Amino acid sequence: MIAPKWRLCSLLFLATVLNYLDRQTVSVLAPVMQKEMGLDNVALGRIFSAFYYAYTGCQLVSGLTLDRVNLRWAFGAAVLAWSVVSALTGLASGFVSLLVFRLLLGAMESANWPGAIRIVSRSFERRERALGNGIFTSGSSVGALIAPVLIVGISSAFGWRWAFVGIGSLGIIWFAGWVLSTRSRDLAPIWRDPSGARRGQPLWAGALAIVRSPQFVPVLLVAILVNPCMYFSVNWLPTYFAQQRHLALGNKMAWILTAIYLGIDLGNIGCGVGILALTRRGFSISDARRAMFLLATAAVACCAAVPLLPLRSAVFALVAVNFGTGIWTAMYLTMAQEVSPANPSTSIGILSGCGSLAGAWAMTAVGKITQSTGSFSIPMQMVAMAAVLAAIAGWFVRVEANEGKALV
């Protein structure tokens, strides 16, 4: 029989797959939608950013809320809500309506990471959390991985509007599975609160404690540097291949994107597996994490060379870039949830909210830069530089030596 924590982790993985499928639909179909709706790169950048602005504001609210409500029903309702919005996006007729649907999708999807992080922190011991985070977070890369083939396939057969309907409908199936296979007791914490926090504390008390944590500033810097790298990959690569490599939206581009996004998946899982392997060889958790994010930084730095490479070499380089991005994403989530073991949803809401805001600005900037220069070289150089700066900030994040005492 599957242990409850692994069953929950599997369902979180599937929810994250849906999360990225739903948000990726516009990115994959962007070349077609740009032509039909008359959108340039500046408009497309604003549409990408709209999602993240809504995502940012609502993540802060989601984090505070999910630390205080029944996780089972709140998390399930969030997945159902964003799936409905995704399906309705097929009704968009122009820039304004598409912008509205993206704002709504960002608001609804904001609950995924705060909720999933809280569930993992309640269900897994500290040494297992990077693996638990890596497993459910890999859903983002699996979503990105299967999105090109699935979305292009539906669009080719039925039209791009039906791709939104088909992808959004999958959330209804997930919700039924979530309700039937989980119980509220499965989400009860396995650890005692080391901070002595009480249920009756003011709503903002947990947030204030998080901001005052000595870990907060370095993890915040990692968040605002790593998130734009991920967002660039999942949002702009289809447009990059269409505009710079002159590939049509079809099977060739779909399979190239699938290969590239496989790198994120391998990085997500590789992060947790690598840390477990290194700690078993005598590394401290801090040193094991540093080794992994230095490897990730070297991989992401390859992004600067992509515009100079022939197509096949560029694809391999982008696989490496996304492998590094996958490691960084799992690492950052683990760092974020440990800023406040007592209020992990609030912690991830604040930190990811700030990271998403940085990502929103970055998406707008990419649109303006590529529109004015006709090239993706500068954004790709910025991705490489962000990874190096994230490594410097991440070096100062340490695991608290007494955290393990909070585990039962």
Image: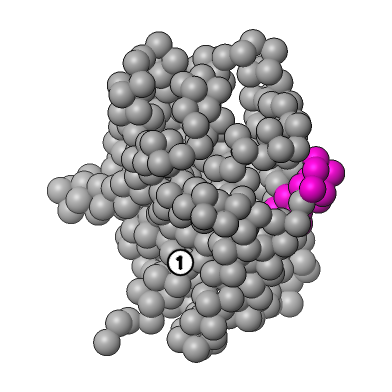
Q: Quadrant of residue 129?
A: bottom left
- The image shows residue 109, relative to residue 244, as above or below, that is below
Task: Please state the total of marks drawn on the protein image.
Answer: 1
- The image shows residue 213, relative to residue 291, as above or below, that is below
- The quarter of the picture where the C terminus appears is bottom left
Residue that appears at 46% across and 39% down:
250
Q: Position of residue 192 (x, y in %)?
A: 48, 75
Q: Position of residue 153 (x, y in %)?
A: 47, 52
- The quarter of the picture where the N terminus appears is bottom left
Q: Nearer the viewer, residue 13 or 369?
A: 369
Q: Nearer the viewer, residue 157 or 79?
A: 157
Q: Is residue 290 visible?
A: no
Residue that appears at 51% across and 19% down:
244
Q: Residues within 10 Å of mark 1 (few under 14, many from 20)?
A: many
Stretch in magenta:
93-106
Query: Quick check: 89 left or right of 251?
Result: right
Query: Quick check: 191 left or right of 375?
Result: left
The residue carrying mark 1 is 14
